[in-house]
């Protein structure tokens, strides 16, 4: 068995056991994972939120909710307490009934599914309150047969991962921590193009939600606002020598962070810090998944790869004419960017001639 990875993605987690069931109003898809990965959020929480949203102007009795989730009033009370612990503002009491005080900004399947209906991501949405890494869990699930379009979302990551050995700061319910399973028919050599297409999808999603944003793309997997990183992507694959078995695309977006640890503050930003206002993570996630769906469908069409290269180059200020320093495992490369080659690798003109950058951290000189 051969595991082929992009040069900058060097690890695959071991498999978990997945139970895939079609999501419905009452029972969205759930996933069974080892304790190290965390536990999928109780699907009844999402259903309670959906019931309360559908009756937003009235108080809903505990009996009514209990009937909806096929349970009893004491269990409804326990689940309401869980929702409050997640930050959902629910007014009321078992004796009087319950009412949402505001629409929750939780990435629950019951909330997201109606917004992304018609995409490949609408059927198998998995939500976690806290998880090690959405990418690690998605890779394990994909190895066990998780269908294409499976989505893994977390409110918080304990071990969020970026490119290489970098970590991803994953504050609770402040960002979007999302990984999707894809099964494209392509050789491993073309997966970098899929990573570039993901950047295009993120850019389109952010500009769709707010057309005032000036979004830039930095090769190979960063999305920038005002020169600072607002989003990073991580593409990992399981492949044979000539074909990909599955790919997991992870996307981390800083949404409502007000600050960052000092080691990240100089290079990181959030949508809130950039615009001065709170954003709906639900709205941004829905826009992201719809944009990913469009980009992926286009990517899978015949002769679509040149379009990805051209559009990435057109939408990035880093691909041509940028003085850069590339820090790799080997010698540091300094020069000026000169575009992408046909595989998606960055070309840099140095004093010794044009060099092809296969991986590494690209910084402006």
Image (cartoon, rainbow, N blue to C red):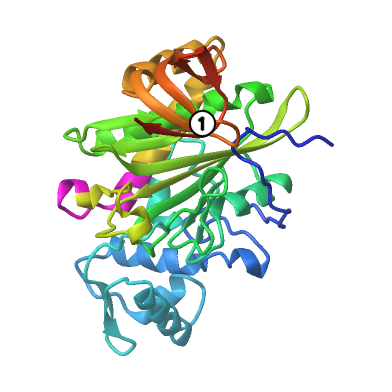
Q: Few, some or many C-alpha atoms within 10 Å of disc 1 (few <14, some 14-19, many ≥20)?
A: few
Residue at the limit of the structure toward the right, as seen here: 1
Q: Position of residue 230 (x, y in %)?
A: 33, 44
- Image quarter in which the N terminus is found: top right
- Image quarter in which the C terminus is found: top left
Would you say 177 lies left or right of 272 here? right
Q: Residue at x 30, y 50 (%)?
A: 266
204 is higher (above) or lower (below) than 10: above
333 is higher (above) or lower (below) than 96: above
Res 323 seen here: yes
Q: Position of residue 95 (x, y in %)?
A: 31, 90
Q: Range of the magenta residues?
A: 274-285
Q: Quadrant of residue 192?
A: top right
Residue at the limit of the structure toward the front, as seen here: 351
Magenta segment: does it hold 157? Answer: no
The residue carrying mark 1 is 332
Could you say which is closer to the camera, residue 159 or residue 106? 159
Q: How many marks?
A: 1
Q: Position of residue 264 (x, y in %)?
A: 36, 54
Q: Quadrant of residue 8?
A: top right
Disc 1 on helix, strand or loop?
Answer: loop
Q: Residue at x 36, y 66 (%)?
A: 49
Q: Position of residue 126 (x, y in %)?
A: 53, 55
Residue at the limit of the structure toward the bottom, as seen here: 95
302 is higher (above) or lower (below) than 221: above
Res 145 seen here: no
Would you say 31 lies left or right of 311 here? right
Could you say which is closer to the camera, residue 20 or residue 27? 20
């Amino acid at each position: 068995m051969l595991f082929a990875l992009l040069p900058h993605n060097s690890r695959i987690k071991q498999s978990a056991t997945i139970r895939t069931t079609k999501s419905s109003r009452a029972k969205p898809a759930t996933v069974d994972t080892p304790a190290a990965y965390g536990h999928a959020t109780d699907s009844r929480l999402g259903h309670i939120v959906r019931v309360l949203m559908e009756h937003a102007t009235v108080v809903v009795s505990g009996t009514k909710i209990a009937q909806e989730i096929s349970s009893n009033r004491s269990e409804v009370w326990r689940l309401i307490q869980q929702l409050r612990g997640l930050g959902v503002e629910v007014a009321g009491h078992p004796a009087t009934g319950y009412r949402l005080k505001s629409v929750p900004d939780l990435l629950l399947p019951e909330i997201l599914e109606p917004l992304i209906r018609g995409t490949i991501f609408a059927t198998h949405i998995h939500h976690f309150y806290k998880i090690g890494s959405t990418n690690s869990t998605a890779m394990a699930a994909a190895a066990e047969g998780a269908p294409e379009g499976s989505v893994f979302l977390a409110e918080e990551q304990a071990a969020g991962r970026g490119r290489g050995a970098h970590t991803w700061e994953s504050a609770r319910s402040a960002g979007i921590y999302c990984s999707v399973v894809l099964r494209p028919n392509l050789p491993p050599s073309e997966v970098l193009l899929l990573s570039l297409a993901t950047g295009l999808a993120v850019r389109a999603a952010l500009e769709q939600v707010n057309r005032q944003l000036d979004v830039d793309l930095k090769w190979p997997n960063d999305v920038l606002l005002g020169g600072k990183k607002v989003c990073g992507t991580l593409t990992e694959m399981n492949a044979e020598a000539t074909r990909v078995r599955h790919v997991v695309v992870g996307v981390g977006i800083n949404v409502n962070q007000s600050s960052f640890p000092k080691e990240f503050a100089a290079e990181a930003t959030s949508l809130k810090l950039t615009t001065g206002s709170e954003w709906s993570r639900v709205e941004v996630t829905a826009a992201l998944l719809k944009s990913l769906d469009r980009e992926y469908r286009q990517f899978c069409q015949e002769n679509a790869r040149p379009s990805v290269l051209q559009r990435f180059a057109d939408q990035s200020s880093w691909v041509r004419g940028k003085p850069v320093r590339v820090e790799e495992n080997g010698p540091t490369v300094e020069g000026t960017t000169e575009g992408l080659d046909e595989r998606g690798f960055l070309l840099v003109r140095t004093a010794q001639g044009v060099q092809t950058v296969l991986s590494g951290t690209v910084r402006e000189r």
